[in-house]
């Protein structure tokens, strides 16, 4: 907790002044109010953490102020300590029962007052951490890595007393770390990806599947030479983020101003790690399902549904930026014969092999989908039909010249291709483009197969 | 907080006795220890919420006991209030700075002591709610409705002071509530599903998209006649669970022992509702994706991948329970002609219509999948080939006699079917069953189409 804010409310100037000087000297941020009305006004403008409240004042008395603060949801959390010359038990009890946290009697015993304030802020600090942890747990409970990373970046620093933190995720297959959130100063760290062995500390935590801590990190065996120059961390704590035996990432805590963690801090950080793990686990579960939802199980190409979504968005983009878009359909010739002669398993091997061929000949910006049984559909952004034909012919001749290995020996197949680009007509939708590419494919089939045909409006009329 | 537990530690018997009687009379659960050693031992066995701790004792003094409690992660959360005749500021400060929460001087001012204890338990109660809320938020952060419901059932009752709660989810299309967790006594409520209009209170909360509360529920306009006899709730609060404008469910809070909520309670419950909503939103997102991942986009039948999963599990079940399983393949005759003659959109309409026919003729326990282009695969548990043939023939004749409405007019199609059941051979896997059903389908095709063929081992040899 950084410099707690105390509001002194007393109608006597000398008391306000004495307290102000004393509390400031003890490191607090202090403000003063000479009356109850002023105090309530100030509370609404700049909420203090604690109010040192006189009881007997000319306008509103301390009890009334306390009552109003505790009635209001927004000011309810402010601690109230009555400071009064009234020594009667009845008065003290009344103050405590309307919601005050403590009662100290005037004249002040300053060392005792300061000790009591330390207790109140210690309790408050601990409590606020849990309030913040509720918010943190709530805000990272999302199925979107960017929103989650943003919440971690914004809130994790408030939760730990350490100077620096960083959260890395691991990829499913292991071997790589990806930095998703940190509060280090270096901006060049954003989006950092690295091999496991680049961070001996993180690698060790993952190997052990439990936390690794170093109280003198910069001189430990985990410090790489690069780091030794860059950091002078006094301590480093690295916790694996995991769900059961599945590794999801790591949480790093570093700092040099606070010394090493105590147990309480460690347990709190371990709780944070658990909460982070739960959210990362959900995310991984979602990503797995998303993969299944968008790809064709056999070929791992995009599926029919996603092709239509991508067709629609690529068609819109092509219109907006006035760039050509080519749609290419490919169909395996006489595929039914393959299935009927050699059985479905062999047919499936051919379907996969052709999918791999298509992917190999296309760019990463292109879209390749399994459209139906033995039919594939492709989108080539910023590519006109002439350029697409070059690609199509490369694919066709490559497939024609290859013998595909199957369980029933090497097999030869050919493909027919149909192409239509957005300049070939006055198209309103991706669906029209698709139907014209299909028309071209039909012509390629009828024209003897193993060939590429570009849609031509004149032929069509 | 139910009956806080106070441990009195004092070496003087008369003080222990006086305090014990006084605190018990005030509603606390009380235990006593005559020495520091005994106290530490008792703390480990039955953790108190607060310790009223004498300082000067023969064996361990109060400071040492406090230090040990605060060093130990497990006992750290216990509040310590020093009760001592020592009035020196130095002593008080030492006590507070080693972790105590308060310091009261002997001889006791009993009313003041009781007032101070009320304050400590008020603060503790508030703080514990947030600790519990962290745990709640963490435990419902799962992508599984049953685990989530279990966590709600176990933990929500501890979070709210109300007597009863219930959480309902709404279905995506609206119209229905499903009870997922509650702490009402009636067991028959488990799994309850009902129309919106069966609960005027919940329906109103959903309509308004904000909370509805009634301080005298049983006589309010929201009480249905059925409920009026059953409950005598003094208050009812119903909060919609939502993500943006999307409705996910409702949280109901009812009770008759505590009177109506105050603002603090309400805000806390609203926070719980927000946290619940986030988890339900994730779950809905996952369910949507799961639907996409397991179904074929065009026909909404299960897809190829899921069919293989179900085939494997149904095959195992059939083996284990020695019940026949029939696998049925269906293929639309001359489907390529439909596509080539009328275009893909019409072909798609036929594919959907046939899918609907298949579903209409099968039971809910059966599995119907789109296997490939114009091929469907079905699993009929506890059904032998003879019984499956009856179903197949019903399907075949139904399709044969129908004219399917398409964009290019009414079309007639036929299907061929192949069946194999688990009794037809000594099969080791679902894949073998599939290949034999495929063989039968091939025979149906070669035999002139529009017919059903059952696999027969003798024919195959």
Image (cartoon, coloured by chain):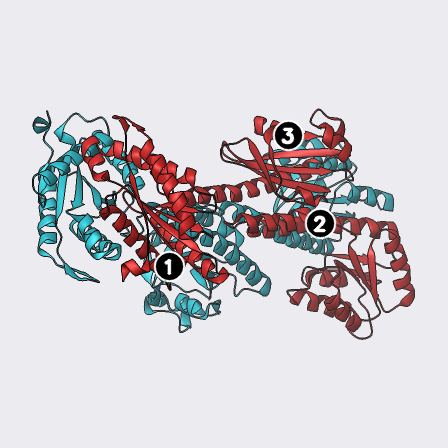
Chain colours: A red, B cyan
Q: Which residue is mark 3?
A: A198
Marks 1/2: CA–CA distance: 69 Å
Residue A447 horizontal side relative to residue A236, left or right:
left
Vertical placement of B333 versus A55: above or below? above
Query: Can residue A77 be seen at all in this image of the molecule?
Result: yes
Residue that lies at the very extreme toward the bottom in this rendered image: A59
Q: Which residue is mark 2?
A: A125
Dot 3 or dot 2: first in sequence order is 2
SS assignment at label 1: helix
Query: Can residue B384 be seen at all in this image of the molecule?
Result: no
Task: Give how far across and how far down residue A353 sits, in percent.
Answer: 34, 34
Task: Give how far across and how far down residue A49 sits, in percent.
Answer: 74, 58
Marks 3/2: CA–CA distance: 37 Å
Q: Nearer the viewer, residue A220 or B132?
A: A220
Are circles 3 and 1 on residues that touch, CB within 8 Å? no
Residue A25 horizontal side relative to residue A209, left or right:
right
Residue A309's image quarter? bottom left
- Image quarter of the C terminus of chain B: top left
Dot 3 or dot 1: first in sequence order is 3
Q: Are marks 3 and 1 on the same chain?
A: yes
Marks 3/1: CA–CA distance: 53 Å
* Residue ID at (50%, 54%): B278
Task: Give how far across and how far down residue B294 sits, in percent.
Answer: 33, 45
Residue A458's image quarter? bottom left
SS assignment at label 3: helix
Q: Which residue is mark 1?
A: A424
């Amino acid at each position: 907790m950084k410099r707690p804010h105390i509001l002194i409310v007393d109608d006597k100037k000398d008391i306000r002044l004495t307290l102000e000087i004393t509390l400031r000297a003890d490191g607090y941020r202090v403000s003063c109010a000479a009356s109850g009305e002023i105090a309530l006004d100030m509370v609404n403008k700049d909420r203090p953490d604690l109010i040192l409240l006189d009881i007997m004042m000319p306008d509103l008395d301390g009890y009334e102020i306390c009552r109003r603060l505790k009635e209001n949801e927004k000011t309810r959390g402010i601690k109230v300590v009555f400071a009064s010359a009234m020594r009667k038990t009845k008065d003290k009890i009344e103050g405590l029962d309307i919601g005050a946290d403590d009662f100290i009697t005037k004249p002040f015993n300053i060392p005792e007052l300061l000790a009591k304030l330390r207790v109140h802020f210690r309790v408050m600090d601990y409590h606020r951490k849990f309030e913040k942890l509720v918010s943190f747990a709530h805000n990272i409970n999302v199925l979107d890595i960017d929103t989650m990373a943003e919440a971690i970046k914004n809130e994790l620093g408030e939760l730990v007393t350490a100077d620096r933190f960083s959260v890395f995720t691991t990829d499913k297959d292991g071997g790589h770390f990806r930095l998703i959130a940190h509060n280090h100063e270096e901006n060049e760290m954003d989006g950092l990806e690295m091999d496991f062995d680049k961070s001996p500390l993180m690698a060790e935590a993952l190997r052990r599947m439990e936390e690794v801590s170093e109280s003198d990190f910069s001189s430990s065996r985990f410090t790489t030479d690069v780091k030794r120059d860059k950091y002078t961390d006094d301590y480093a704590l690295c916790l694996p983020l995991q769900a059961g035996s599945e590794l999801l990432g790591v949480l790093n805590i570093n700092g040099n101003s606070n010394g090493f963690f105590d147990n309480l801090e460690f347990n709190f950080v371990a709780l944070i790690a658990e909460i982070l793990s739960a959210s990362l686990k959900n995310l991984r579960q979602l990503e797995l399902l998303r993969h299944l939802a968008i790809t064709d199980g056999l070929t791992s190409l995009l599926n029919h549904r996603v092709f239509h979504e991508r067709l629609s968005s690529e068609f819109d983009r092509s219109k907006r930026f006035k760039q050509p878009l080519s749609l290419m359909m490919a169909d395996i010739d006489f595929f039914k014969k393959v299935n009927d002669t050699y059985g479905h398993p062999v047919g499936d091997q051919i379907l996969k092999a052709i999918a791999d061929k298509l992917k190999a000949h296309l760019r990463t910006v292109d879209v390749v989908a399994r459209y139906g049984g033995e039919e594939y559909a492709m989108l080539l952004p910023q590519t006109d039909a002439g350029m697409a034909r070059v690609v199509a012919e490369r694919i066709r001749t490559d497939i024609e010249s290859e013998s595909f290995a199957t369980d029933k020996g090497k097999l030869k197949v050919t493909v027919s291709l149909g192409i239509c680009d957005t300049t070939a007509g006055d198209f309103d939708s991706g669906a029209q483009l698709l139907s014209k590419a299909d028309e071209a494919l039909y012509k390629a089939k009828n024209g003897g197969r193993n060939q590429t045909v570009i849609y031509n409006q004149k032929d069509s009329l």
